[in-house]
Image (spheres, helix red, strand yellow):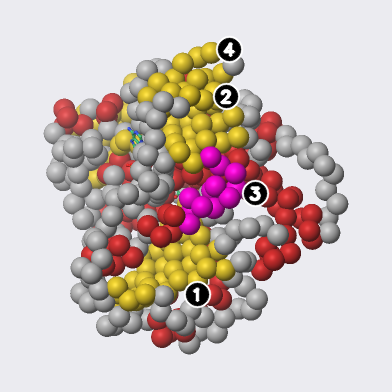
Amino acid sequence: MELRCVIRGCVPKKILVYGANFGGEIEDARNYGWEVNEKVDFNWKKLLQKKTDEIIRLNGIYKRLLSNAGVKLYEGEGKIVGPNEVEMTQLDGTKLRYSAKHILIATGSRAQRPAIPGQELAITSDEALSLEDLPKRAVVFGGGYVAVEFASIWRGMGATVDLFFRKELPLRGFDDEMRAVVARNLEGRGINLHPRSNLIELTKTEEGIKIYTDHKEELLADVVLFATGRAPNTKRLNLEAVGIELDNAGAVKVDEYSRTNIPTIWAVGDVTNRMNLTPVALMEGTCFAKTVFAGQPTKPDYNHIPCAVFSIPPLSVVGLSEEQALEQANGDVLVFTSTFNPMKNTISGRQEKTVMKLVVDAETDKVLGASMSGPDAPEIMQGIAVALKCGATKQQFDSTVGIHPSAAEEFVTMRSVTRRVTAGGKPKTTNP
Ligand code: NDP
């Protein structure tokens, strides 16, 4: 088991996002009266060291938490050898067998690489978090979370970034209107977008890595990042030998309580490929503990799970997208949108709109979904998620007093319906 989110995931990524954000902040500061010298230098190695120190510190805290809770930690590679038995090859090569009443698989997922010639020249997010040097020219392949986040990080730090993805818009699965907003904002920050494009080959040249696309484009880069999704880590666990069922994607199949087809073996997190987010894995783990050890059978609740894409600026959402609402609602759906220039930009001069959106059930007035693209969106959306979880209606949003002046107050002042959409009156979920 590895504390992936802490070591090679959300936490180091967020530190890099903070670092990259200063690029834009320094630009914005000029019109606020800060005299910034023409040449502003960014020291990647310094940030990398600081990030590593912080990760080591956090890792120590997590290990202490485990040992204080009475957990014995064995480090090495494990596999399941029976319904109640695991075998571990420890770091010094010695093997250890361990029997238990219950076994929980929480081995996560690993980055996938498209099988194109020269694919070994590309890196994945694992290496991207610890690159020796900051790339001057970065190519990112993929249109999901990792792709837009790293494109934003490197661009914020001054690199030239080209983002290639195979659909019309990045971030499939999110609200289409918000995806378009993100694409616009990424471009506004200077990222070169290449929609409907695939990398087909990479070669090594003296000038850097040469990439070839299916549009006959050629480009040189210092770093090529494959951000093309992750696959569950089930291969080396010996699961077939024990008869644990996997789905077509290689994920461990579990029931609503996270139990596999072998009653003593359970699984949570990315290895089950349900909703691959760290807080969701934590929820699944908590429910497992309640079910198995506290005598309270508890199912994870996948409704109203907020999430954020830490692009610059970020996108954050909770509940249903407009497309999902149209598929699931019984009657009409009311859509409220607000597009505005954040107050900070009026002085800084940055040309970047914040966009907020509420999707409301016309009959019940319940807010079905909320989205925001703009600074602080994840911080704002966490509170909105509580409201949606409580079943808030639009009328309750409207009767909530705003915090002035803030961007967040727009969520409680969207009075006019932008459009009323009849379920079935619009194409069902599009997949551009
Ligand atoms: P995602 O599943 O989010 O996105 C994968 C992207 O790669 C999609 O755009 C997909 O395109 C594209 N893709 C997949 N295969 C190919 C291929 N063969 N050729 C071209 N494009 C391809 O994966 P990520 O790697 O971005 O993230 C992995 C996981 O980590 C996600 O499940 C996410 O939940 C999690 N994560 C969460 C974060 C957060 O909460 N902020 C941050 C980072 C990761 P298409 O859309 O066309 O299928």
Q: Residues within 10 Å of mark 4 (few under 14, many from 20)?
A: few
Q: Nearer the viewer, mark 4 or mark 3?
A: 4
> Which portion, as a residue range, is magenta?
181-192
Q: Position of residue 345 (x, y in %)?
A: 67, 63
Contact check, label 3 and label 2, Cβ < 8 Å: no
Q: Residues within 10 Å of mark 3 (few under 14, many from 20)?
A: some
Q: Nearer the viewer, mark 1 or mark 4?
A: 4
Mark on residue 222?
Answer: 2
Q: Return the residue at label 1.
A: 411
Q: Quadrant where the N terminus lies?
A: top left
Q: Earlier in the sequence, mark 3 or mark 1?
A: 3
Identify which residue is drawn at 20% across, 68% down: 424
Identify which residue is drawn at 40% across, 48% down: 169
Mark on residue 285?
Answer: none
Identify which residue is drawn at 47% across, 83% down: 415
Q: Return the residue at label 3.
A: 21
Q: Residues within 10 Å of mark 2 (few under 14, many from 20)?
A: some
Say which element carries label 3: helix
